């Protein structure tokens, strides 16, 4: 254990020196992490961001683009040979063109390098030649950040906490019955172990679908090539009095520790620790639609996710980072094109309130943060219609389910976010005085003019915050 920690520290130092040397003498690199819970909009965000950095006509708020300092932007081979490449071309082809559709779910880590050729403008224009800046974008599931909280918890703690949380949840009924029929002190039986892991995974999947975010271990939902391996074949059980050697409990305890060591730590060491700038995408509208419980759970999951950006909280992570920190974090509420722009400030305020708790406790170790409402790919147009003699703000688009055009009003978000967050915190079952609807729109067919990227809302402002200062 201790040896492992020291070795981790050493790797980090050597790497740290490597990247400083290359930055000073060669070409600067910005590592941008893009994360969010599943379906938050990561793939659409990266695809649209890259397309709009390559064709910058829709990026007036990105100062370097508006001033013409960015001469060209082009894709290059990424630096990490063992990470899957973010499949930009396939995603872009899906999202644009005459019969566009949303890209497929991705559910694993991937990387893409975009290189920007930048010519300084203004007074120093003549003094400096053009330089190349590499933007390495890393897409990873937010669920993996939730696993950080496992590192300082034992199997017994995690089990007790998880079993407590699922007590009142309907979709956990089958798993609770399985636990009730299990003797954790009995000898390990592999088919039984597998059945428990499968039962617990089925619960996690249903909880995730119902809008719950506290779904650890994160890899149970996104197993990739670990599916079926022992590190993913355990589940929470009540602690028996004196579990004998070779018992189900002892073996699950061991596998839980292996999960932390072999799955969680390598992700933080190899990927998370190298990120300079981070965007956290949040489907806040989706949670509001699902109801107060989903909003409260999202707030808690945000606090857990954001814990990863306050390294003081976890001794192992602090040692790994050695004082290096993420410089900027953007919290972006996605899919803002479901709302008329008049409501965007309210969505931003809700986003701010959702992360406020975590932020108050420690300002992310000095990282600069901002909250925003964005749409990476705008699928609607705005309109105001007459509704019983009153003007009503709506958005119009092509419904995904029926393929029909429709005007849609999702409900009024409150001006004061506490009108949503307080009932959620107090355990309300439904919103008292209002209802929020979410419709799924298909992307609009677009014909892009030369120089134009896909239509979006505030993607340029997001890019200015995330990388503008380095261009
Ligand atoms: N209207 C609208 N819908 C969006 C936007 N971005 C994402 N969506 C919707 O959200 C869904 C999920 O987006 P993705 O980008 O695939 O989300 P993800 O976080 O990569 O999801 P996983 O890969 O499953 O983790 C899409 O299929 C769209 O329905 C947007 O800007 N506007
Ligand atoms: Mg994805």
Image (tube, grey):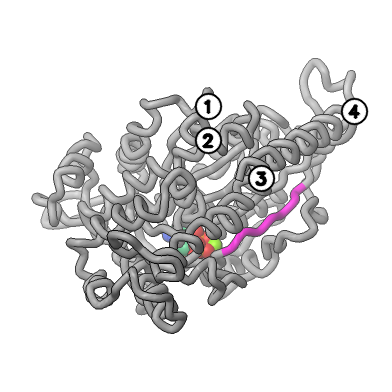
Relative image position of residue 281 (x, y in whole percent): 47, 48
Task: In this rendered view, identify the residue nearer to me: 330 or 147.
Answer: 147
* Closer to the eye: label 3 or 4: 3
Task: In this rendered view, identify the residue nearer to me: 68 or 246.
Answer: 246
* Closer to the eye: label 1 or 3: 3
Q: Which residue is mark 2?
A: 329
Task: In this rendered view, identify the residue nearer to me: 20 or 115.
Answer: 20
Relative image position of residue 62 (x, y in whole percent): 62, 35
Q: Is residue 118 magenta?
A: no
Label 1 to label 3, Cα distance in Å?
Answer: 32 Å
Ligand 2 is located in which of the four quadrants?
bottom right
Which label is found at residue 106? none
Label 3 to label 4, Cα distance in Å?
Answer: 45 Å
* Callout 1–callout 2 Cβ contact below 8 Å: yes
Q: Is residue 110 magenta?
A: yes
Give SS at disc 4: loop
Q: Which residue is mark 3?
A: 4
Earlier residue among tags 4 and 2: 4
Task: In this rendered view, identify the residue nearer to me: 246 or 218.
Answer: 246
Q: The magenta stretch spans which residues? A: 108-114
Relative image position of residue 293 (x, y in whole percent): 22, 54
Label 4 to label 1, Cα distance in Å?
Answer: 30 Å
Q: Which residue is mark 1?
A: 368
Give the residue drawn at x 33%, y 69%: 184
Q: Which residue is mark 4?
A: 129
Give the residue drawn at x 43%, y 76%: 188
Whether residue 445 appears in this view of the structure is: no
Give SS at disc 1: strand
- The 10 Å Cα crowd at callout 2, few under 14, some 14 to 19, many 20 or more, is many
Give the residue drawn at x 85%, y 27%: 24
Earlier residue among tags 4 and 1: 4
């Amino acid at each position: 254990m201790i040896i492992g920690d020291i070795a981790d520290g050493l790797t980090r130092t050597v790497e740290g020196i490597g990247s400083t040397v290359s930055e000073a003498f060669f070409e600067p690199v910005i590592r941008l992490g893009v994360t969010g819970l599943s379906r938050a909009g990561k793939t659409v965000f990266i695809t649209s961001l890259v397309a709009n950095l390559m064709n910058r006509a829709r990026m007036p708020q990105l100062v370097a683009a508006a001033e013409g300092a960015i001469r060209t932007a082009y894709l290059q081979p990424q630096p990490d040979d063992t990470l899957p490449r973010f499949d930009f071309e396939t995603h872009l082809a899906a999202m644009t063109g005459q019969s566009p559709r949303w890209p497929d779910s991705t559910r694993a880590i991937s990387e893409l390098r975009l290189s920007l050729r930048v010519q300084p403008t203004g007074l120093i224009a003549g003094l400096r030649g053009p330089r190349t800046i590499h933007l390495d974008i890393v897409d990873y599931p937010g669920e993996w950040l939730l696993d950080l909280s496992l590192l300082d918890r034992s199997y017994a703690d995690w089990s007790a906490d998880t079993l407590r949380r699922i007590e009142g949840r309907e979709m956990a009924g089958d798993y609770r019955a399985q636990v009730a029929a299990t003797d954790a002190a009995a000898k390990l039986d592999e088919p039984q172990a597998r059945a428990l892991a499968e039962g617990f995974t089925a619960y996690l999947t249903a909880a995730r679908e119902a809008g719950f975010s506290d779904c650890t271990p994160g890899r149970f939902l996104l197993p990739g090539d670990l599916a079926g391996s022992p590190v993913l074949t355990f589940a929470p059980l009540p602690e028996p009095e004196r579990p004998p050697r070779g018992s189900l409990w002892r073996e699950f305890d061991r596998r839980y520790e292996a999960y932390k060591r072999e799955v969680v730590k390598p992700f933080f060491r190899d990927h998370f620790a190298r990120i300079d700038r981070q965007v956290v995408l949040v489907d806040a509208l989706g949670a509001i639609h699902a109801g107060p419980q989903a909003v409260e759970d999202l707030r808690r999951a945000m606090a857990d996710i954001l814990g990863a950006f306050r390294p003081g909280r976890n001794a192992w992570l602090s040692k790994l980072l050695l004082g290096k920190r993420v410089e900027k974090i953007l919290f972006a509420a996605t899919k803002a094109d479901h709302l008329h722009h008049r409501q965007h400030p309210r969505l931003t305020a809700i986003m701010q309130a959702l992360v406020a708790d975590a932020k108050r406790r420690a300002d992310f170790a000095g990282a600069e943060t901002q909250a925003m409402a964005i749409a990476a790919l705008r699928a609607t147009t705005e309109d105001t219609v007459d509704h019983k003699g009153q003007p009503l703000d709506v958005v119009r688009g092509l419904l995904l389910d029926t393929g029909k055009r429709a005007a849609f009003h999702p409900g009024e978000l409150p001006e004061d976010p506490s009108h949503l967050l307080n009932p959620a915190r107090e355990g309300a079952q439904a919103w008292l005085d209002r209802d929020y609807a979410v419709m799924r729109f298909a992307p609009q067919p677009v014909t892009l003019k030369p120089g134009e990227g896909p239509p979006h809302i505030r993607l340029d402002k997001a890019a200015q915050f995330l990388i503008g200062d380095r261009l």
